[in-house]
Amino acid sequence: MAYEYAKRAGIDLLPILRKAGLEFREVQDGETRLAVSRQIEFLKLTADALGDPYLGFHLAQSPDLRALGLLFYIAASSDTLGEGLRRAARYSSIVNEGVSLHCRTGPDIRVVFEYVGVARYLDRHQIEFLMTALIRVCRHLTGLRLMPSRVRIAHRRIGPEDSQLAPYFGSNTVFGAKVDEVTFAGATDMPVTSADPYLNALLIKNCEQALAHRRLHPRAYRVAVVNAIAPLLPHGTVRASQVAARLGMSQRTLGRRLATEGVTFSQVLEGLRGDLARQYLSDRHLSVSRIAWLLGYQEVSAFSHAFKRWSGKTPREVRAKTK
């Protein structure tokens, strides 16, 4: 969708594809599986070329929902919204191995997006596309203009453009959260207007077969550690023991597993801070003191010293060059 959108806008896509590690044939062939990290990078580069900081959000508003494919049809043929979203979450890895959906239902529906094998902090367009598409699907299936009762988004957005999201995400939306999730209050038993038990049974059978035969990739512990560290940074010192506990293992086990990938905990932490610092410095709405806090530094001077060690320049020098 992003490729076609940028093509219509007259963007030269060849250099963007090269930078993202993709080829024309891979994007044009709907059957080719793309690495999620490359998809995220392509979306970012395309958004930059278009000057559209909300590319994912805008893309999700335009297509026929049937273009979303398998997950749409399995939800659309279910009896209730809660049932449809639970099934779509179960089979989500067939479509996108880098984002795992978890659907928890009671009186409310809570859909959680978890990144697997890819660093969450690198992305914002894909997740905003997925969340916007989810809300559109729920409205389409019920015939109602459902509004989420709560939305939590892990990346940060600061600026007047955030008002664009309000009509879809609602007023109870928090950026910089510890988790990506969308909650609908009292929606579990809402009937789906297009329910088709015969089609649903057929789709479930095919999905179960696909799920049983899909290839499982070994877990990259470095990425898992990065995703566990990121939400902890603004709260001060991040300790290996904290992260190990979040990942359900001992600190010693975590150290051993990182060692097999040739890194230490402190190297992963410093690498993440460096990447986030450069990302935050490109956002003019964030002051240097605010960035220091977001990265877990109590003093701006400590952040400045660390940044100069990473890049050879101070944060203010880097920001001045990007004006």
Image (cartoon, helix red, strand yellow):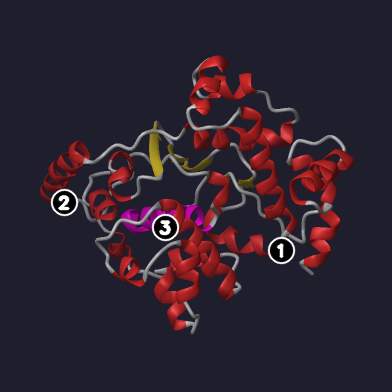
**Going from the N terminus, do you reach mark 2 or mark 3 first?**
3
Query: Would you place residue 225 above or below residue 200 in this image?
Result: above
Q: Can residue 126 be seen in this view?
A: yes
Q: Distance between the residues labelled 1 and 2?
A: 43 Å
Count neighbours of disc 2 (C-alpha within 10 A) and say few if under 14, some if 14 to 19, many if 20 or more: some
Tell me which residue sits at (16%, 48%) in the image.
Answer: 203
**Range of magenta residues:** 125-146
Count neighbours of disc 3 (C-alpha within 10 A) and say few if under 14, some if 14 to 19, many if 20 or more: many
The dot on residue 133 is 3
The dot on residue 196 is 2
- The mark closer to the camera, 2 or 3, is 3
* Amino acid type of the residue tagged 1 in the rendering: Pro
Query: Would you place residue 97 above or below residue 102 in this image?
Result: below
Residue 154, position in %: x, y? 58, 44
Residue 252, position in %: x, y? 55, 15
Total marks shown come to: 3
Tell me which residue sits at (77%, 61%) in the image.
Answer: 284
Q: Mark 1 points at which residue?
A: 160
Residue 115, position in %: x, y? 46, 41
Label 3 residue SS: helix
